[in-house]
Amino acid sequence: MIFAEIKTDESYYDLYPELLQLVQQTFSNVGSGVQGDAWIWIYEGEEKVALDTFTSMRFQIKSDNINGLLIQKVIYKLGEHYKLYIYDEPELEGHEDTF
């Protein structure tokens, strides 16, 4: 589910190094990569939050856990550094089921 999106005129490719550095300084378990699209995965316990450009030209903040503490932490931290568009209700991605 998509919870928020980073609002910037900067291309995601140009934003990626700065964003990755911030995430790595803030969270201890981080995976990342660029292969056409860019992605950063943040892990804490059983939770995972993804920052990626898979379905947008901007970084979207995603999680499978609607009540997760990690998604709240990530949105709060990124909101200190970037303008965010936060969805009123998380949006499902095209590959997610609507149960």
Image: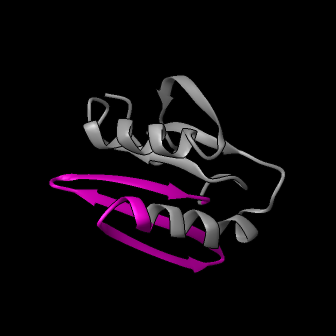
Residue 2 in percent (x, y) is at: 50, 39
As displayed, is residue 26 above or below residue 90? Answer: below
Q: Nearer the viewer, residue 77 or 37?
A: 77
Q: Which residue is outermost to the right?
A: 9
Residue 25 in percent (x, y) is at: 42, 65
Taking the spot 57% from the left edge, 29% from the top edge, the residue there is 86
Q: Nearer the viewer, residue 72 or 1?
A: 72
Q: Nearer the viewer, residue 96 or 68?
A: 68
Q: Coloring scheme of the render?
A: one colour
Q: Which residue is outermost to the top?
A: 88
Residue 92 in percent (x, y) is at: 47, 36
Taking the spot 34% from the left edge, 60% from the top edge, the residue there is 27
Task: Report the magenta stretch's main SS.
Answer: strand
> Where the N terminus falls, by quadrant?
top left
Taking the spot 28% from the left edge, 59% from the top edge, the residue there is 43
> Where the C terminus falls, by quadrant?
top left
Q: Is residue 18 left or right of residue 22?
A: right
Taking the spot 26% from the left edge, 37% from the top edge, the residue there is 69
As displayed, is residue 83 above or below residue 89? Answer: below
Residue 63 drawn in magenta = no
Residue 50 in percent (x, y) is at: 43, 55
Q: Is residue 58 left or right of residue 79?
A: right
Tally of numbered tags: 0
Specify the segment rendered in magenta. Answer: 24-53
Residue 49 drawn in magenta = yes
